[in-house]
Amino acid sequence: MSELQEQIHNRRRKLEELGRQGVELYPHAFAHDFAPSEVHARWDERSAEELETNRQHLRVPGRLRGIRRQGKVMFLDLDDGRGKLQLFVRRPQLPEKAQQLLD
């Protein structure tokens, strides 16, 4: 099996596993607060202290383009085609189901 065929096989296997876990693989709609580009427009100029003081929980649509793990934290790249967000995740603070999904 070539490297490309192996990658395709692994991706299909992972996709099937997500389906078995009940993840909607190709959702038609996603209720969201802001697109990544709108998040940038609204919060880019604010300081880290201001953002920390005024925490917000947002639903942001996009395609997960990258996952980098460093110990108990992760950096995720979320892209909507017009803008990209880098998410910082403290893995121990995630619900168990979310941890399994990211694995």
Image (tube, helix red, strand yellow):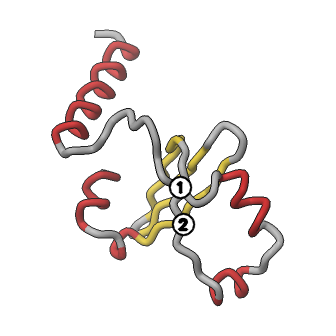
Where does label 2 land, which residue?
58
Q: How many marks?
A: 2
Residue found at the very far right of the displayed protein: 45
Tell me where residue 62 appears, x and y as whole percent.
Answer: 55, 45
Instruction: Name the residue rendered at 46%, 47% in the picture.
Output: 30
Q: Circles 1 and 2: CB distance less than 8 Å?
A: yes
Query: Height in image: 94 above or below 40?
Result: below
Q: CA distance from mark 1 to mark 2?
A: 7 Å
Viewed as shown, does residue 93 lie left or right of 50? left
Q: Amino acid at mark 2?
A: Leu
Viewed as shown, does residue 78 lie left or right of 50? left
Query: Height in image: 17 above or below 46?
Result: above
Query: Height in image: 54 above or below 21?
Result: below
Q: Please identify the quadrant where the N terminus is shown.
A: top left
Q: Residues within 10 Å of mark 1 (few under 14, many from 20)?
A: few
Where does label 1 land, which residue?
32
